[in-house]
Amino acid sequence: MPTLHIVIPVYNERGTLEPCIERVIASALPAGWRRGIILIDDHSDGAHYPAVESLVHRLQAEGRDLQFFRHDVNRGKGAALQTGFDAVLAHDPDPDDLVIIQDADLEYDPNDYTSLMRPIIERQADAVVGTRWGKHYTYKSFKHRVHALGNGALTMLSNAMTGYRVSDMECCYKVVPVSLLKRLRPMLNEMRFGIEPQMVACLSRLGAQVVEVPVRYDPRGVSAGKKIGWRDGVRALIVIARERLRGGRE
């Protein structure tokens, strides 16, 4: 039975992690598919980690397909994803299994998994990137519109370097088959949010056909725990330029 491997980095998310995992477990998958969860705690602090530990113990007691890892120090989202990707590949999964990234907050809806998986299952794409923006999304505030504009500027620059025509390069939801992840993983080394443009740039260098799928999005602010900031935008620019200088397809 093919597996969707769901890689979930978490850092100080005691208020959202459990409902997020419940949504992941309850989400529908295409017929014949099963799910495996890879949870990576990026060294949550003492106020948050007990909630992570308690949830992991409960899921293990329930017999869920769960792998859990904890970093000794906080290293960043990119580092957590790399730990998760390595865990997926270490168990010799089927090449046609799929891998998806899921943030541990409640901004993204796991009920979008099936639509995100479908283009790859139907051999219409090598990889899928979600898009938050478009006719399906209603902006909730001026601040959210500014956020979208900033992401749009980074995405336009990324497209210019990769040749893709996606509208939301920074979207959390990215789906790749295991066969492609094996080639992609050695190219990834960004420790923080720079992993997002790096993944897209590396997919381009591998000649992967990428399509985007609209996804639901419920943005949160810094007061609610959002961690990405303007420095990460600067880093994204550096990563986009650096990956372009690394050359063409591999």
Image (cartoon, helix red, strand yellow):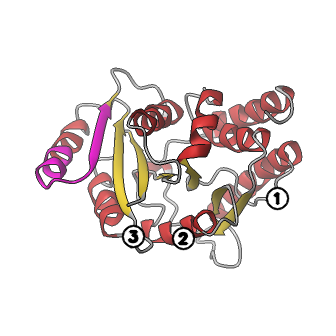
Image check: 228 left or right of 47? right
Between 22 and 119, the residue placed more toward the observer is 119
| Residue 132 percent coordinates (x, y) | 63, 65
- State the residue at coordinates (78%, 31%): 243
* Figure quadrant of the C terminus: top right
Q: What stretch is highlighted in magenta?
A: 55-69
Image check: 51 left or right of 36? left
Rounded to the nearest angstrom, the CA distance separating label 1 from label 3 is 32 Å
Corner quadrant of residue 162: top right
Residue 39 drawn above or below residue 152: above
Rounded to the nearest angstrom, the CA distance separating label 1 from label 2 is 20 Å
Other-residue count near label 2 (Cα within 10 Å), few / some / many at <14 / 14–19 / ≥20: some
Other-residue count near label 3 (Cα within 10 Å), few / some / many at <14 / 14–19 / ≥20: few
- The verdict on residue 213 being magenta is no
Query: Disc 1 marks which amino acid?
Result: Arg
Mark 3 residue element: loop
The earlier-in-sequence mark between 1 and 2 is 1
| Residue 139 percent coordinates (x, y) | 63, 72
Image check: 215 left or right of 200? left
Disc 2: which residue? 216
| Residue 13 percent coordinates (x, y) | 34, 46
Corner quadrant of residue 25: bottom left
- State the residue at coordinates (18%, 39%): 50
Query: Disc 2 marks which amino acid?
Result: Arg
Disc 1: which residue? 165
Disc 3: which residue? 32
Rounded to the nearest angstrom, the CA distance separating label 3 from label 2 is 24 Å
Query: Disc 3 marks which amino acid?
Result: Gly
The earlier-in-sequence mark between 1 and 3 is 3
Q: Which residue lies furthest to the top in this view?
A: 72
